[in-house]
Image (spheres, grey):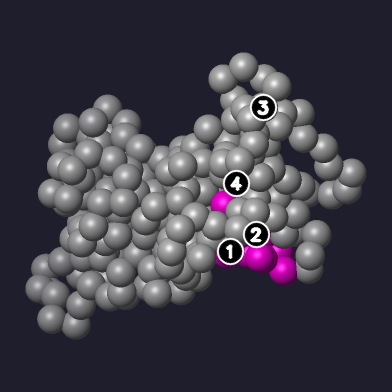
Amino acid sequence: MAANAPTRWVPLLAGLALLLARGGPTSACSCAPQHPQSAYCQADLVLRARFMGLSQASSNASASHVRYEIKTSKVLKGPVSGQDLRYLETPTLESLCGYQHAAPLRGEEYVVAASFEDGRATVTSCSFIQPWAELSLGQHRGLIQAYEKGCHCQVLPCQALPCTVTSDSQCLWMDRLSGHGWQGTQAQRFACLPHSRSPPGPTPGLPLCTWQLLKARGALPAHH
């Protein structure tokens, strides 16, 4: 919260923070691993934005939600009208995967992958929300251009060996087995994209997809 925020907002924001921290006594939110490409392709809206404030959801929205005020600098996916989007809603309770913005408000710029629910942009603690400056150059390239080309491909997380694919449109995501968790080389430098010099895969309507290196500049990419 900004140091010069009006005093009357302090109890409200403190109360909202308390609500966000509460969860059910036995329930918890669990998120599946998600490659940045999958986050981009599955989202309705991907933005570069700053979180500006926190408030109660509007009277037309569910009472179980709060909303973050944002200031969008660029729409990476979604309607151009996303540039004018002012709020992101999230469940109040942590047990319902409510998102809590840990960084200071009015701070650095974030990439936000959001969904639309009843006309409202929503995020959860499972949403891809990362500081833009902390992403790799390959991830910048993916979000700006490359991931869109791979939305007919599927990144398949490999939790433990043996792992297999069931379609030529799938790419095995092996980062967890490399000792770097899910933020290894494939997450930071590669995208699962249609192979430009190969015929379509054997399954009708599905491309043959391979991991391809995302370079910061230039034409799409070397095959891997």
Disc assigned to residue 192: 4
Given contact means CB atoms under 8 Å apart, are the residues at marks 1 and 2 in contact? yes
- Above or below 149: residue 191: below
In which image quadrant can residue 218 be found? bottom left
Disc assigned to residue 189: 1
| Mark positioned earlier in the residue sequence (1 or 3) | 1
Query: Is disc 3 surrounded by few (<14), some (14 to 19) or many (20+) residues within 10 Å?
Result: some
> According to the image, label 2 marks what residue?
186
Q: Nearer the viewer, residue 95 or 206?
A: 206
Disc assigned to residue 201: 3
Amino acid type, callout 3: Gly
Q: Nearer the viewer, residue 155 or 29?
A: 155
Give the Cα separation between the discs numbered 4 and 1.
11 Å
Q: Nearer the viewer, residue 23 or 207?
A: 207
Give the Cα separation between the discs numbered 4 and 3.
14 Å
Report the span colored magenta: 180-191
Q: Element type at marker 2?
A: helix
